[in-house]
Image (cartoon, rainbow, N blue to C red):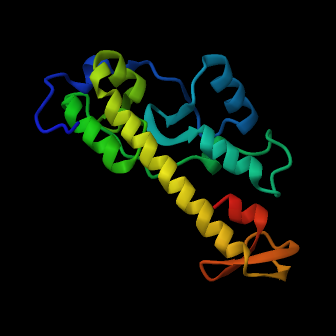
């Protein structure tokens, strides 16, 4: 299914209003508790209503995989969040949002007006009003799975080339694998 024309529905009409937000200074522990309590997979980090980052479940998993993090209370959400953020205006047509999400491979887009966060558009929001777009979501998921499998094969091949030494990423003595010209341990390689 390809979207070639405007749907006629504005992003602002279907976006999630009052998205779950927090300060970039919130501890990772408190952020996880807030996300669990509100049953959300991401948290918009704002300061004076201006978007500073997005903390996703993937960001949290990456942080937890690092050996240097010992206490979640000491890590600030702003330190590990995604800062390079793509946003959309509430006046944009839903077809533009879908095209942007497909291009960037995102499942969510912050909705902003003059740098101020006013909502959050998620794939669930879109599917709720346009169930026929499920095929697009399914296609996106299939592409993601194919890329993940390709990455696994690359890592498996890279495992065949290894040596013992100090990891270029974390500095620990370990069995190292050569990947992209770096000598890294298995833990650091999985977090890439």
Q: Is residue 167 visible?
A: no
Residue 34 sits in which quadrant? top right
Q: Residue at x 71, y 38 (%)?
A: 28
Q: In the visual, does 97 lie left or right of 46?
A: left
Residue in the foreground of this view, choosing between 148 and 38: 148
Where is residue 135 shown, x and y percent of the image? Answer: 33, 32
Which image quarter is the N terminus in?
top left
Residue in the foreground of this view, choosing between 179 and 31: 179
User: Taking 64 as reference, is 31 above or below it?
Assistant: above
Where is residue 152 shown, x and y percent of the image? Answer: 62, 60
Q: In the visual, does 157 lie left or right of 15?
A: right
Which image quarter is the C terminus in?
bottom right
Q: Is residue 77 visible?
A: yes
Q: Residue at x 59, y 68 (%)?
A: 154
Q: Residue at x 79, y 44 (%)?
A: 74
Q: In the visual, does 179 lie left or right of 167?
A: left
Residue in the foreground of this view, choosing between 3 and 46: 3
Residue at the left extreme of this rendering: 5
Where is residue 185 shown, x and y percent of the image? Answer: 78, 70
């Amino acid at each position: 299914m390809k979207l070639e024309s405007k749907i006629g529905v504005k992003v602002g009409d279907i976006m999630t209003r009052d998205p779950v937000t927090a300060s970039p200074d919130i501890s990772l522990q408190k952020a996880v508790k807030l996300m669990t309590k509100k049953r959300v997979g991401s948290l918009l980090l704002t300061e004076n209503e201006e978007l500073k980052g997005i903390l996703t479940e993937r960001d949290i998993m990456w942080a937890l995989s690092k050996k240097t993090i010992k206490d979640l209370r000491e890590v600030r959400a702003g330190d590990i969040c995604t800062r390079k953020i793509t946003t959309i205006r509430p006046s944009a047509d839903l077809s533009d949002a879908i095209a942007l999400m497909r291009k960037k491979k995102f499942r969510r887009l912050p909705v902003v007006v003059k740098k101020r966060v006013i909502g959050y558009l998620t794939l669930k929001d879109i599917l709720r009003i346009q169930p026929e777009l499920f095929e697009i979501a399914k296609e996106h998921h299939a592409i993601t799975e194919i890329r993940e499998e390709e990455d696994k094969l690359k890592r498996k091949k890279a495992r065949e080339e290894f040596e013992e030494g100090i990891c270029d990423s974390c500095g620990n003595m370990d069995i190292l694998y050569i990947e992209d010209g770096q000598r890294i341990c298995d833990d650091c390689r999985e977090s890439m």
